Image (cartoon, helix red, strand yellow):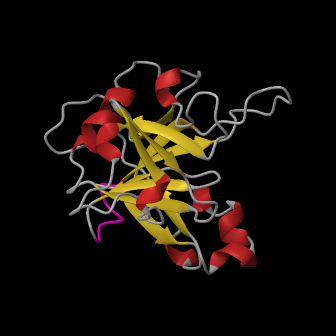
Amino acid sequence: MSWLVPSPFKLIFRRPRDYSTGSLVTYASGKYRYVSTAPDLHVIFGWLQIEQHLASNDFATIPLWARDHPHCKADTYRNLDFMYLSPNRLHIPGVEIEKAGAGWFPHFMPELCLTAPNQTRSVWQLPAWFAPGTSTVGFSYHRDLARWKRDGCSIFLRTVGRGQEFVLDTEAYPEALQWLCQLLRMNLTIP
């Protein structure tokens, strides 16, 4: 199972070598909308479970309704990107959850905020189980243990400035699926 978080990055929770069918993408951003006085935070604002991915440069496989997407039109993106299509209903093996295959959280809630209180958006406060261990590597690009600092039930991560996606292996971190399901069950989602 994969979980992605884009804009300006993706946070991917996945099983090794499984980036396609069944993956769930969660989206995060610095802001829901621009407000000059708003704090600059990374906040999860939506998700998309991947049922199918299509290469943006394989125009014959792109559904008619998606062909106007900028990644299908611009040569800048076309050779690099994929289009991800979601199922109608979310499916996570072994988990009962009634949610659409894609949706968003319409309002800010502290549980959705990755940025640690009183920190820049590059410092995240996460549940302690996110910590890398001797047999687990944590997020890609974040294998340097100096970036991680445990504090009680939390772990603080000083994120790297590069990378559009951060990957976490859900076989090594099975708590990730329950944590994300808990966020989805907050009944604040659309649809």
- Residue appearing at x 29%, y 67% in the figure: 18
Give the magenta range: 17-23
- Residue appearing at x 65%, y 53% in the figure: 8
> Left of 141 or right of it: where is 1?
left
- Asked whether 46 falls inside the magenta stretch, the response is no
Q: Residue furthest right?
A: 36
Answer yes or no: is residue 51 visible: no
Front in this rendered view, residue 162 or 35? 162
- Asked whether 20 falls inside the magenta stretch, the response is yes
> Left of 168 or right of it: where is 76?
right
State the quadrant of the N terminus: bottom left
- Measured as percent of width and height from the top left, residue 96 is found at 19, 31
> Left of 84 or right of it: where is 18?
left
Answer yes or no: is residue 104 visible: yes
- Residue appearing at x 20%, y 56% in the figure: 171
- Measured as percent of width and height from the top left, residue 22 is found at 30, 55
- Measured as percent of width and height from the top left, residue 13 is found at 35, 53
Q: Residue furthest left?
A: 94
Which quadrant holds residue 80?
bottom right
- Residue appearing at x 60%, y 58% in the figure: 66
- Measured as percent of width and height from the top left, residue 142 is found at 46, 61
Front in this rendered view, residue 117 or 165? 117
Q: Is 72 located above or below residue 109 in the figure?
A: below
Q: Is 116 located above or below residue 73 in the figure?
A: above
- Majority secondary structure of the magenta segment? loop
Front in this rendered view, residue 151 or 54? 151
